[in-house]
């Protein structure tokens, strides 16, 4: 069975690495997501989950590990926009506080990422279909 599509957009806005997930963050893409985000060693990371429809336990573990790496390096981490399904997964895992109600100072909500071809990268790990 082929998992539903997953896409991530990566861009920068005012010195903040901004990442937007769409689709389902599941085990086939978790290693790639972790590697891509941790390798960049951002001083500030904002994860927008507003287009994420679901997340499995490995996806959740990846978010926790990414947060730990960013914070351990002295960086700022903001996770926002999770839908009810994703929030329920956070709650079931006892990680209700993982999502920020308000953006951290200096990391605002980003409504538009730079277009593809500028500093943004539209990426679909492991060749998964892109989500429009």
Image: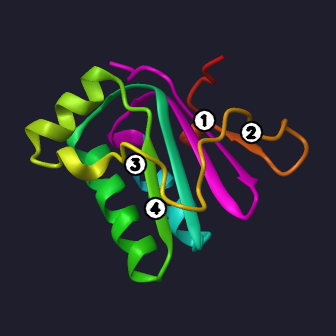
Of badges 1 and 3, nearer the viewer stands 3
Residue beneath the point at 35% across and 24% down: 83
Of badges 1 and 2, nearer the viewer stands 2
Of badges 3 and 4, nearer the viewer stands 4
- Work out which quarter of the rendered image holds the C terminus and state it: top right
Residue 127 numbered tag: 1
**Nearer the observer, 43 or 32:** 43
Q: Secondary structure at mark 1?
A: helix
Residue 46: give x, y in percent of width and height: 54, 52
Residue beneath the point at 42% across and 20% down: 4
Q: Report the residue marked by disc 2.
A: 113
What range is drawn magenta here?
A: 1-28
Q: Report the residue marked by disc 3.
A: 30
Q: Report the residue marked by disc 4.
A: 77
Q: Magenta span: helix, strand or loop, mainly?
A: strand
Residue beneath the point at 9% across and 37% down: 92
């Amino acid at each position: 069975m082929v998992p539903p599509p997953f896409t991530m957009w990566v861009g920068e806005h005012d010195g903040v690495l901004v990442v937007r997930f769409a689709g389902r963050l599941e085990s086939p893409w978790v290693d790639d997501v972790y590697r891509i985000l941790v390798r960049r060693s951002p001083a500030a990371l904002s994860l927008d989950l507003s287009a994420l429809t679901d997340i499995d336990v490995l996806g959740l573990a990846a978010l926790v590990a990414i947060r730990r790496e960013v914070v351990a390096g002295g960086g700022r981490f903001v996770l926002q926009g999770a839908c009810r399904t994703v929030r329920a997964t956070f709650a079931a895992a006892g990680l209700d506080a993982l999502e920020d109600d308000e953006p951290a100072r200096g990391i605002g909500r980003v409504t538009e990422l730079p277009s593809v071809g500028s500093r943004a990268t539209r990426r679909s790990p492991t060749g998964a279909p892109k989500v429009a």
